Image (tube, rainbow, N blue to C red):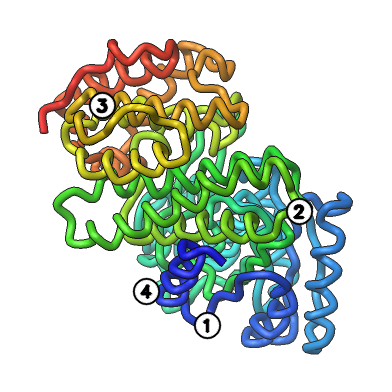
Amino acid sequence: MSKNIVRAQELILQWKGNNYAHGIDVLHKTGEFVKEYGSQTLLVVADLGQAWIAGIVGTITASLEAHGITYTTVLGAGPNAPREDVYRIANDISKKRPGSVIAVGGGSTIDAAKAASVLSTYSTTQVMKYLGASEFLASSIEPYFGAGNVTKIKDSSGVSPIPVVAVQTVSSSAAHLTKYSNITDPLTGQKKLIIDLAVVPPKAVFDYGVTSETPKSLTLDGALDGIAHMWEVFMGATGQNYYEQVREIAVEGISLIVKNLPTVIADPLDMEARTALGYGTDLGGYAIMVGGTNGGHLGSFSLVDVLSHGRACAVLNPYYTVLFAPAIEDQLRAVGTVFKDAGFIRENLDTLDGRKLGEVVAGGMIAFSKSIGFPVTLKEAGATEAHIDRMITAAKNPQLESKLKNMPTPMDIAKGDVDTYMRPVLDAAFTGDFSTIKSMLC
C-alpha cells in the first residue's frame, strides 16, 4: 500500500472517526449504522432496477434484515439532482415517516436525499415563521438555498432533519461526507446550493470496491470533481489559518487521483487503484469542509444541460488558475509538481513565477484532461455564448455569493468585478486562449 494511501487513511480517520465505514467489503456496516435510528428506514437507490446497482442493494438489504430493520425501496435522483426528484423523494419520506433515510448512489441521489429529508421535516408554517419565506415559496426547496438556513430553522424549531445514512457508490463529490446539497432546476438549467452542517450525513459507508461496477464516465467525472474540490479550496486558502492543513490534503489527494486514474482506466478491476481514487475524492470532501470552492464550481452550476459537474469543473479551473496565478504561487508550485511528476508538465517550475507559472500549471491540467478524453474548452464541450451569459447572471445571485468570496482574490459584484474579470475568463475557457484573461490585483 502506497504512502499516499496510508496518509489519506490517517487524515480521514482524524476527520470522521468511527462514523464512516470505508475501504473494501464494508457495505455490511450499513445495517449497524441504520439501527441507531430505529427499525424502519426508507432506502433511496440510484438507477434502481439496473444491473450495476443490484448487487450493492442486495448486500445492503441483507445487512438491514440481519439487524431486524424493515425498509421500503424507492428510486433515487437523476443526474444533477433535479428539483422534481427531491420533491418526489420528500413525498415518499412524508408518507412513510421512517426513522432514517438510506441514500445509495452517487452525489446526485445523496444530495437529493439530504434536501428531501429537510423538505419533509418542516411545515410551511415553520418555514414562513423562521426563514421569512413567502407563502408561495414556503413549501418549496427555495428557502433553504444558501448558507445556514437549515440550521436556522432546526435551532428555532428544535427539530432536526430525518438522519440520512449515505452509501456512496462513486469516487466523486464526497456528498456522503459533506455539508453541501446541489439541486438543479431543469427548466432554467441552473443548479443551486444548500450549504449547511445540518445536512451532513451522521453516518456514511463507502465500499471503494463497488466503484468497479459503475460506468467509466462516472469514474472519470468523479475523479475530476475531487481534484476541483481540493484545487479550488487550496487556491483560496492563502492567508487562512487552515492553509497548511489544506495544503497537505490537496497535495495528497490530487496525487492519488492523478497517479491512479490512468491505472483504473486501463484496468477497471485494479482494487488498489480504486481504493486510491476513493481516498483521493474523500480528501476532496475533507477539503470542502475546511474551506470553500469558487470559480470552477460556480460556473459548473450553469452548465448542467451540456456537461456533467466534474467535466465542467475540469474545463473551467485551468482558466481560473491563470487568473489567480499572481496570488497563488505556492499553491501552483505544490500542485504543479504533482502534474509534472505524472508527466503532464515539461517546464522547470522553479524558474517560473506569476502568470507564466500559472499558464504552465494550467497547461498541465489541460494535458491531463486531454489524456482521459475530456473536453478542454467550453466550445468543444458543446456550450454556447448563451451559457457564458447564464454563468455571469448566476454569479450575481446572492445565494451563490460565497463562491466569489472564496476566490484567492475575491470578486465584488458591486464593483463590477464579475463583468470585468470573470467574463474574460469564461471567454478564454470558450476559445482556449489564455491571452484574453485579465490579471486581478492581489
From this view, report whether residue 398 is shown above or below residue 280: above
Q: Nearer the viewer, mark 1 or mark 4?
A: 1
Q: Amino acid at mark 1?
A: Asn
The tag earlier along the polypeptide, 1 or 3, is: 1
In the depicted view, which residue is nearer to us: 212 or 320? 212
The tag earlier along the polypeptide, 2 or 4, is: 4
Residue 204 visible in the picture: yes
The tag earlier along the polypeptide, 4 or 3, is: 4
Q: Residues within 10 Å of mark 1 (few under 14, many from 20)?
A: few
Kindly identify which residue carries mark 1. 18
Kindly identify which residue carries mark 3. 323
Disc number at residue 155?
4
Circles 4, 3 touching at the beta carbon (< 8 Å): no
Left or right of 57 in this view: 389: left
Q: Nearer the viewer, mark 4 or mark 3?
A: 3
Residue 188 visible in the picture: no
Q: Amino acid at mark 2?
A: Leu
Q: Amino acid at mark 3?
A: Leu
